[in-house]
Image (cartoon, grey):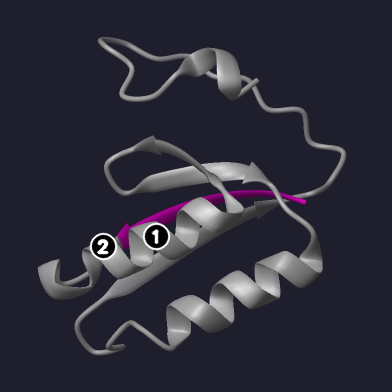
Amino acid sequence: MYVIMIYDVNRKRVSKVLRIARKYLRWVQRSVFEGRITEKDFNELRMEIQNIIVENEDSIYWYILKKEFVPYRHYIGEPKSTISSII
C-alpha cells in the first residue's frame, strides 16, 4: 500500500513522532511523510505513534492508497526534501 501521513502534534511530541515516521516512510516536508509500506509495517507504525500521542491534543491523518497506485507529484516552490528519492 502507499501511505501519506500528516501529523499535527504538540511540540513536546514532534521529535518522537518524526523519528518513528522516518523508520517507515519518507519525509516530504514538515509534517508530511509518504511511501510504500507493508500492512504489517503500517500496523507497527500506527501502534508506535498511538503510544506517543495524546488523543485529545494531537492528530494524525493517514491517506491509504491501493498497492497498484502509482504516485506522481506536482509542486510549486522549493521542495523541502529530495524529489529524486520519492518517485
Membership of 60 in magenta stretch: no
Q: Which of the 4 image quarters holds residue 50?
A: bottom left
Q: Position of residue 31 (x, y in %)?
A: 31, 49
| Residue matched to label 1 | 19
Check disc 2 and give the amino acid type.
Ser
Q: Is residue 46 left or right of residue 29?
A: right
Q: Which mark is residue 15?
A: 2
Q: Secondary structure at mark 2?
A: helix
Magenta-highlighted residues: 1-7
Q: Nearer the viewer, residue 82 or 5?
A: 82
- Residue located 31% across and 11% down the image: 76
Q: Is residue 68 left or right of residue 22?
A: right
Q: Is residue 84 left or right of residue 30?
A: right
Q: Which of the 4 image quarters holds residue 34?
A: top right
Q: Position of residue 8 (x, y in %)?
A: 25, 62
Q: CA distance from mark 2 to mark 1?
A: 6 Å
Q: Position of residue 2 (x, y in %)?
A: 70, 46
